[in-house]
Image (tube, rainbow, N blue to C red):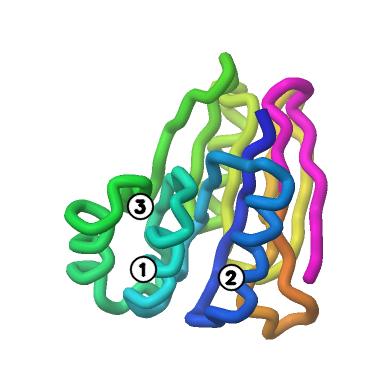
Amino acid sequence: MIVGVFSDVHDNIAALNSVLDDFKDRNVTRAIFCGDFCSPIPSRVMGESGLAIDCVFGNGDGDRVAIHRFASTDFPNLTLHGEHAELGIDDRKFAVTHYPLYAQALARTGDYDAVFSGHTHEVHEEAFDDCLWVNPGEVFGVKGAPSYAFYDTGDNTVSISRL
């Protein structure tokens, strides 16, 4: 399965829509969001996309109550996991957090096939034995073209895309 991975929207709705459209164009049905919606608006856009999206919070998520409301009442396709998540898809186990310090530590444990994080707004890919640690960059686009990733559960690889 190909899983879309993205982070750090920071209310850039135009770029978010482009990323979600690319996911749909490539038949992605499940995605992971590594935090920093900023306002509730991106959560509404994600919910309206219809994609199943597992989300964690970042340091820039202001109105968590409204984001939770969208996820729990309006959009059952959004799953909020709080500050971190452990997920299993296609016999792969991975962790999601916004913070790279925690992601790197989790990747070093050997307990996961992949760990995903955000926060730095910069693409990063590193392997620790059999664990892949990936930061897909940012949807926001403050440090260059918005970026996001496609994770392949079949062979535990990732490819980065840019708008």
Whether label 1 touches label 3, CB < 8 Å: no
Q: What's the residue type where badge 2 is placed? A: Asn
Q: Which residue is mark 2?
A: 17
Secondary structure beneath label 3: loop
For the N terminus, give its image quadrant: top right
Whether 44 is drawn above or below 93: the answer is below
For the C terminus, give its image quadrant: bottom right
Q: What's the residue type where badge 1 is placed? A: Arg
Q: Which mark is residue 83?
A: 3
What's drawn in magenta, residue-wise? 150-163
Q: CA distance from mark 3 to mark 2?
A: 24 Å
Q: Which residue is mark 1?
A: 44
Q: In the rendered structure, which disc, 1 or 2, sits on the residue that comes first in sequence?
A: 2
Q: Residue at x 74, y 81 (%)?
A: 143
Q: Residues within 10 Å of mark 2 (few under 14, many from 20)?
A: some
- Expressed as whole percent of the image width and height from the top left, the position of residue 56 reads 40, 53
Q: In the rendered structure, which disc, 1 or 3, sits on the residue that comes first in sequence?
A: 1
Give yes or no for residue 140 being in the magenta stretch. Answer: no
Secondary structure beneath label 2: helix
Q: Residue at x 60, y 60 (%)?
A: 20
Whether label 3 touches label 2, CB < 8 Å: no
Q: CA distance from mark 1 to mark 3?
A: 19 Å
Q: Is residue 77 left or right of residue 160?
A: left
- Expressed as whole percent of the image width and height from the top left, the position of residue 119 reads 56, 66
